[in-house]
Amino acid sequence: MTTVNNAEAGPHIFDITHGVERTRLSNGLTVLTKEIHAKPVVSSIIWYRVGSRNEEPGQTGKSHFLEHMLFKGTDRFAKGEIDLITLQNGGANNAFTDTDFTAYYFNFASDRWQVALEIEANRMVNNTFAPDEYESEKQVVEEELRIGLDGPWEALDQAVWAAAYRQHPYHNPVIGWLEDLERATREEMEAYYHQWYHPRNATLVIVGDIRAGETLGRVQELFGPIPSGPEPKPMPIREQPQRGERRVTVRKQTEVERLQIGFHTPEVTHPDAYVAQMLDTILGTGKTSRLYRRLEEHDQSVTHFSVDYHDRIDPTLFTIRAEIKPDHGLAEVERAVEEELDRLRQSPVSDEELRRARQLIKARFVLGNEQASNQAITLGYYETINRYEYLSDFFTKIDEVTAAEVQRVARHYLVTDNRTVGWLVDEN
Amino acid sequence: MELNIERIELPNGLVVLLSENHALPAVSINAVVKTGERYVTDDKAGLGSLAGELLDEGTATRTAQQIAGEIESVGGALQTAAGYATTGVSVTALASDLSLGLELTADLLRHPTFPEDRIALEVSRKLAEIRAKQDEPRVVASEAFNEIIFAGTPQHRPLIGYEETVAKITRASLLDYYRRFFVPNNTIIAIAGDFSSAVAEKVRQLFGDWPRDPQFEPPAVPRPQRQREPVARFISKDKEQVNIYLGHTGIERANPDYYAIRVMDVILGDSPGFTSRIPRILRDEQGLAYTTYCHLARSAGLDPGRFVAFIGTAPENLERAVSGLREQIASMTAAPPTAEEVEAAKAYLTGSFVFEFETNAQMAAFMVSAEIHQLGFDYPGRFLSEISRVTAEDVWRAAQQYTDPDNLTLVVVGPTDQRGEVGSQKSEG
């Protein structure tokens, strides 16, 4: 086991990577630990680098369904026991699946948190997949999928990603297509579990009121004996550049029309990712942002809007969404967004806008990572899709972004030929 | 567990609550005026919400854009909001920007002007939001449920109001409402985080000359009637799922049985994961739903909240889901819970209490709530001992006293007809 300490890297109190230690067990498990003694709580999260991104055609939704099955019984913890242990210890647990990862968390008071390690070490390789549990949980997942089908934003979001990606698995919703889910078998799921759930494909993050040395000893005891598992299979598909606008319309019973535009943008490791973060803020964060002033103040054409650069392992989408007021129209709002993007392409942003965007990104980052559990999520997320050191460079890189770069990136990515426009309209 | 909280009451009646914590160079301000839709009459529904939203839309010396510009230029976040019984301003910012946060808070609470153009903007946004709600079957079901169980009280209305009432709100009525309720002797300011003792002086300087209203009295609010017969309402919507609410009115926060009811909730339907009866049986064993729960204490406030069970399921499961919920609700009154259930629930409530005080914003919100409900700042210790004292008999007695399985209100939204028949035809809009 080798440990690298980041205590010297960032003395700044705003740097959440300060004090993080990365340890790699000989079986390949990555462990990040960080001591925070301000509150008597510990957050532990295990991240597997597998999500809908790794699903083959016809097999969508498997990563997410598998996440559900990890609460349904192992050779040591019967169904319901993980929740019962969490309850009796006054903790919280849950799990989340996305395109690039699946993560399981426990938050406990610091005098009793280590039970989380026993559970995660056990269910990394010993899940049982009882046939009747599989069938009953399949119904639960189908109900979850139906909630999504009933939501207007979920429907539009699915349509836009599906149109923007033709080959790459970002085409598929994380929850999967209903038909794939119905067809899925228990045997396929078990094989998928053994393919992806092993130390070499996992990062364990432990943040809070711990002693790192002692904690790592216990991690070694529990996880050390687990075989490292196969080399994770690379996901070779690269989406080809989009050459020309794509448009989709979703019809649904609704009184309120909705717009979502997605632009292909680079992956998290690309140098332009930082610039995309700045563009996201300049366009969409706060009441001084450009789209707020244009859409909500000047045109008064939308009730809400949002801008999101989704940082991911592979090239991703930069999305703009808006909920249209009844006496305004989709075409009008789409045109206004385009005019604002054109303004960004035509002339550099002001120094004041740059300064404000930097300050917003930094302060929101600090304020958003107040809890041990927030930090465990942020660290684990970036370690899984990139490396957590991305975060220690983050503020410096954000400071280095210039108006000229913002303009260049807007000109390069936020253009008509590179966009997918989705309209949600009433079915009648 | 002890909290360091300082309480200061200014001569004008303003209550200031301070809790220092230097873990992070950040602060949270939570300034609350004890008003909301609770004091608004039916014909003006939405007035309280609108007034809250408009606090940062212009003051005597600042425009909406100036307010946003000042707080955003330092990366802080400022929100105004109005709930049922509280309205106010919350700020989260870096510690170095506390003074700015307090200055803005004082300005917004003391000198809002409710400019006509901003009223028009906010009203049009609210009207659109009222329509957008129709796309959320769970919201439609929840509102229909409130309308029935809280009939005759302000809680029967959605906080946002109705199209016809919101459209008619005038600047004059906003100003009347503001003048009546926004007085220092009806206001609490809580500050948590990384600050020094100088902050108390700053608060005095900003709020000390806000004149007390010696006449101020909060109006009386009608109490909901306990229902004496079952009620059912079906609303047709073309959706994949049926959303089901089942329950009746609940308890006030001041109810002495609050702690026994917290334990009951964890046993019946409000636990982490799927340990409590309703999620364990309806979701984990029967696979009927992704989301299902039940609770009584969670919405306890100045007025009685609601005893409510929820499940969202495929239309063909409607009957099984409703009878499953009914059966579990009835199980709590039929017999006392097992000793294991009670012990596990108590261990959960006491063991997880520490998570309610993790952030500055949580701490500020706790201080406000402790002040409003007169919990006392020794509350953490008392909470733990009150929970520890709860017995299976207490839970059983509370279930019998505060839940009535034979007289529940049922609301179903989804592809059913108005008698609850599923699947025959598509529905109205």
Image (spheres, coloured by chain):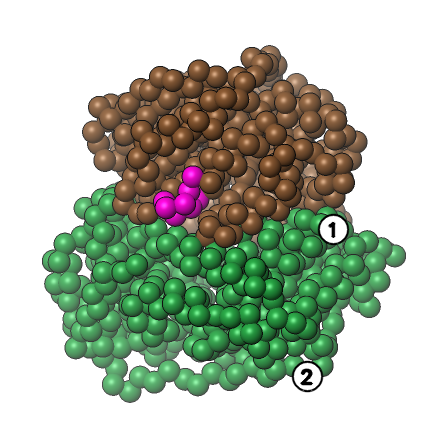
Q: Residue A92: which numbered mark, if any?
A: none
Position in image of residue A373 (x %, y %) = 40, 41
Secondary structure that dominates the magenta span: loop
Q: Which tint is chain A?
A: brown
Which image quarter: residue A420? top right
Viewer-closest of B135 and B58:
B135
Q: Residue at x 64, y 39 (%)?
A: A73
Give the class, few, some or many, for how many residues have Cα within 10 Å of label 1's Cα (few <14, many ≥20). Answer: some
Q: Disc 2 on helix, strand or loop? A: loop
Q: Chain of mark 2?
A: B
Q: Residue B352, relative to residue A128: is it above or below?
A: below
Q: Chain of mark 1?
A: B
Q: Amino acid at mark 2?
A: Arg
Q: Disc 1 on helix, strand or loop? A: loop
Task: State which region is magenta.
Answer: A107-114
Position in image of residue A121 (x %, y %) = 51, 30
Q: Which tint is chain B?
A: green
Q: Is residue A126 left or right of residue A286?
A: right
Q: Earlier in the sequence, mark 2 or mark 1?
A: 2
Q: Residue B203, relative to residue A124: is it above or below?
A: below
Task: Tell me if residue B373 can be seen.
Answer: yes
Q: Amino acid at mark 1?
A: Gln
Position in image of residue B114 (x %, y %) = 36, 65
Q: Residue B228: which numbered mark, if any?
A: 2
Q: Residue at x 29, y 87 (%)?
A: B215
Q: Residue at x 88, y 57 (%)?
A: B424
